[in-house]
Image (spheres, rainbow, N blue to C red):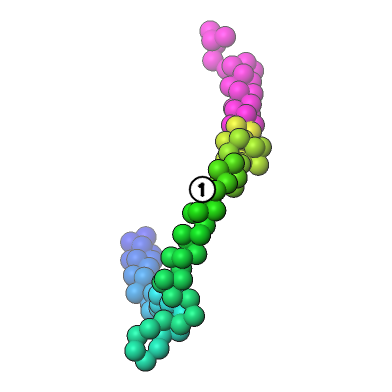
Amino acid sequence: MNGKILVFLAVAALSSMIIPSLMGIAHAQYMGNVGSEGETGAYTLEEALEIQRRRIEAAEANPASGSGTPYLDASGVVGASVIAGAVFGGIAAAFFIRGRSGKYAAMGRG
């Protein structure tokens, strides 16, 4: 029995050392091509900041549009949470009610 555990631990240790070496290295993404003087390509930081500034101005100009996330809609965050709570709560209530009676219920309860 101890031999099987030792073999399993040895395989797990080797796997934990070998598997990360087989994975590729993740490199950071550039916003554009880097030139010889260190400048970025077509999508520079200034352009990205300008686009974000325009988005903020558009959102401030149209406050009725909101963020686009329908929180109270059935397909939104709160609506989906209420629906899921009602479904799973109903199932749990059915189990609790069913569990108070029946063949295996303890004598003297309910």
**Number of disc labels:** 1
Tell me what residue is drawn at x 59 percent, y 28 percent. 89
- Left or right position of 58 against 90: left
Assess whether residue 89 is covered by the magenta stretch. yes
Q: Is residue 42 above or below residue 62?
A: below
Query: Within the image, what quadrant is residue 72 found in?
Result: top right
Instruction: Tell me the residue that label 1 is attached to.
Output: 60
- Left or right position of 2 against 74: left
From the viewer's side, name the closer residue of 66 and 4. 66
Q: Residue furthest front?
A: 61
Tell me what residue is drawn at x 52 percent, y 57 percent. 55
Say which amino acid is labelled 1: Glu
Tell me what residue is drawn at x 64 percent, y 37 percent. 73
Q: Is residue 57 above or below residue 64?
A: below
Counting from the top left corner in percent of width and height, residue 98 is at: 64, 20
- Left or right position of 51 against 14: right
| Residue stretch rendered in magenta on the structure | 85-110
Q: Residue furthest bottom?
A: 36
From the viewer's side, name the closer residue of 26 and 55. 55
Tell me what residue is drawn at x 62 percent, y 18 percent. 97
Q: Is residue 41 above or below residue 14?
A: below
Counting from the top left corner in percent of width and height, residue 28 is at: 40, 75
Counting from the top left corner in percent of width and height, residue 37 is at: 34, 89
Assess whether residue 107 is covered by the magenta stretch. yes
> Which quarter shows the N terminus?
bottom left
Counting from the top left corner in percent of width and height, residue 2 is at: 33, 61
> Which quarter shows the C terminus?
top right
> Within 10 angstroms of label 1, few (less than 14), some, or many (20 or more) residues?
few
Circle 1 SS class: helix
Q: Is residue 13 above or below residue 75?
A: below
From the viewer's side, name the closer residue of 29 and 63. 63
